Amino acid sequence: MAVKPIVKFIRNSRGGSGNVDPQRLFGNLAQTNHYQVDFSSLSTFGGQGLLGYIEDKFKVNLDFISRSSGLLCSEASLPGTSLATAEVKDNFMGISQEFAHTRLYTDFDFTFYVDNDYNNLRFFEGWIDFISSGSEINGTIPRTGRNGDGALPSQSNYYRRMRYPDSYKCQTISITKFEKNFGPRMTYSFMNAFPKLITAVPVSYGGADVLKVSVSFNYDRYVIGNNGFSKGIQGSFADPKQQSSELQQVKRSTFESLSGAPPAPVLPTPTEAATQLAAQQQAAAAAENLRLENLEKSKTDILAGARSAEAADPFANGSNYGIPSGSDRFFRGSDNAIYRVRNDNGNIIIYKDLSGPLGNIGDLEITSSNNEGSGNLWLWTDLKNVSEKGGLTGDDNNTSFGGVSR
């Protein structure tokens, strides 16, 4: 018994309208060998310096880059993407959830035929060499305002410096997937792409084969179905609209009075939040300035107190009160008594002058600087005051020298 060919499918088990033609469904599957790669946007948005470098140093015609290079792509892959997620276990007991937080893009690989002028090989070698040739700049380095070093790769002290991304990233590299009837198509545009890796190209004796080079590209992101791009305008994004805190407060109070439920927190608008942050920063700066002023004032007060204490101290700085070593001087104390002062090799000794028949032999030693005054601070203060006024004398005549009065 011959099997009848299937001429239609029924979409659901209930039958009725909506039959599917299997020949039309499976006869229109997309093929893998119809696609095109395009580098034409390489000349825009800073690519001029790159193209000039490739043309001058690696002798690759610019017309080949924009028109022929993509046609020599023998293998390509439509890009893959994924989402990085974070696991949350606290929302529901016994249930873990994941939430996306970052979209991830993997590098894409192209394989190209190499013509007998090696244009594709020199093109990608020149592109990667340009990225790392910042040290070869002779003129002013872009964005820095300073002159380059003009390093030469043939010199032994040559070094590498990377160029700025705007100068070597291609605004878009696109791959368009289409069919032989040139009907529906999908275009993947890779934003800010640049070659990251050139794989080794094997050559060998024996049977000949077409030479190929594989290149891995990195990019920021890709979009689908866009045929043109332009640089975004800085500051063109507006803040998301949000109700003012006053309106939120009114709704909060109304909700609380009607339902008795806990009120929702009042969130400030972005403008209000920025104003509050600026005010907080100003207050913090003022508090810091006040703290520094108080600290400086405290240091000044401490220093002034130390200087005052030093000025009042009769023993400060190891004073010898203007008395030469081995010499004697006399002064009248605040108690109206006569005192003899001797500088005994830096040890200041105060004697009470008794003016006996044996001269100074009978004088009574009261104190000395070696024993730090022995409790006679008032007497040392008298000595200091008299010496500062020039009242010390070498004569023991009671009427020939000055003193201090109580």
Image (cartoon, rainbow, N blue to C red):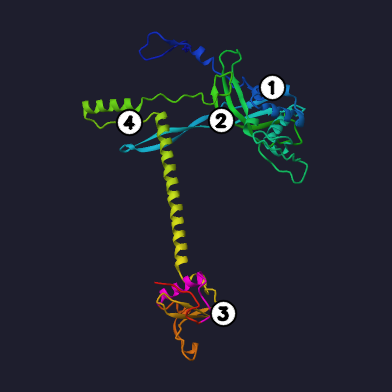
Which residue matches tag 1? 66
Give residue 276's quadrant in the image.
Answer: top left
Disc 4 marks which amino acid? Answer: Val
Residue 55 lies left or right of residue 34; in this view the side is right
Alpha carbon separation for disc pair 1 and 4: 56 Å
Which residue matches tag 3? 325
Earlier residue among tags 1 and 4: 1
Single out the residue that lies furthest toward the front: 399
Q: Are marks 4 and 2 in contact (CB under 8 Å)?
A: no
Query: 310 or 162: which is nearer to us?
Result: 310
Identity of the residue drawn at 46% across and 86% down: 355
Where residue 237 sits in the image (x, y, percent)? 49, 24
Earlier residue among tags 3 and 1: 1
User: Which segment did they paint magenta?
Assistant: 375-395
Which residue matches tag 4? 266
Residue 163 among magenta residues: no
Alpha carbon separation for disc pair 3 and 1: 100 Å
**Mark 2 falls on what kind of element?**
loop
Disc 2 marks which amino acid? Answer: Asp
Earlier residue among tags 4 and 2: 2
Which residue matches tag 2? 220
Earlier residue among tags 2 and 1: 1
Looking at the image, residue 243 lies above or below residue 373: above
Residue 66 lies left or right of residue 366; in this view the side is right
Query: 235 or 224: which is nearer to us?
Result: 235
